[in-house]
Image (spheres, rainbow, N blue to C red):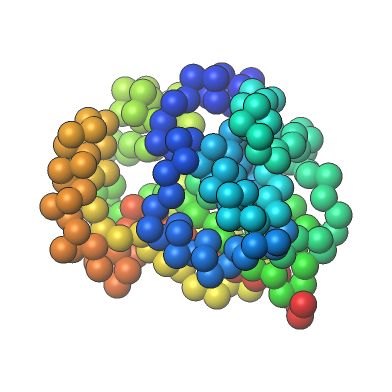
Amino acid sequence: MSYYENYWDRSVTKWNLGMISSDEQFLFSEFLKPGGKCLDYGCGPALRYGKFLQDKQVDYHGFDISKSAVEQAVHAGIHVEMMDEAGKTNLRDNSMDVAICLEVLEHLMEPGVALAEMLRCLKPGAPAVISVPNAGRWENRVEFFLTGFYSPGGSPDTSRREPWRDAHIRFYSAATFQRMARESGFNVEKLIGEKFSLAWLPVVYRIPFLHKTFGLLSKPFGFLGRVLPSLFSGRMFLIVRKPGHS
């Protein structure tokens, strides 16, 4: 737990500055409606998703294990509470209309605990939107094949310099991501790949000018991430549902 207290104390990245990608906006508009009760599992300080969803009049309930992250969220006026050390929230069974868990499972020693808690809280038939980095994307495969080095991708400060200290400790391919969700009790509806981009190449993603330039150059090839997400998508979204009928 102390790791993530320090993590959110020192993290000032694009992940908590309120920027919502076009893929996220599309999924939010489809599954998160004004007045709907939303669980955000592992929300961090919620300055990205929480603020956006509250502004859209979603009944937002964020939970995180980091006291520092929760304090930042509360200070910003976002409805976030502490989960307990076992990863449980204080929500009632079958009470949430939707759950989101975005870029969280790769940080967890026991990701099944997070999925079980979302399953418990969701109403029968309710959806969850979950995302993880794609460990099997083409640049990771090429780099590992040529050099034997795997970059965890959790932080520019650690991913290549000190991978043993990186925040990412679980790694998912398209196949293992879906299998984990099924074995946790969810019905899997679809896997959506983020658009292909060269902006996340090693070194490039750490330099703002290069990151932006390579992102623009990649736009004509964005469709590759949709067509073959297991290879060309840097990030995968999984749409799942709790069994049953609402």
Indicate whether 214 appears above or below 153: below
The residue located at (65%, 56%) in the rendering is 58
Residue 4 % position (x, y):
59, 26
The quarter of the displayed image where residue 129 is located: bottom right
Indicate whether 75 appears above or below 116: above
The residue located at (13%, 52%) in the rendering is 217
Quarter that holds the N terminus: top right
Q: Looking at the image, which is closer to me, 28 or 172?
A: 28
Left or right for 89, reference 74: right
Indicate whether 139 appears above or below 5: below
Indicate whether 133 appears above or below 76: below
Quarter that holds the C terminus: bottom right
Residue 235 % position (x, y):
39, 54
The residue located at (70%, 54%) in the rendering is 59
**Residue 41 seen from this side:** yes
Left or right for 214, reference 56: left
Residue 126 % position (x, y):
69, 70
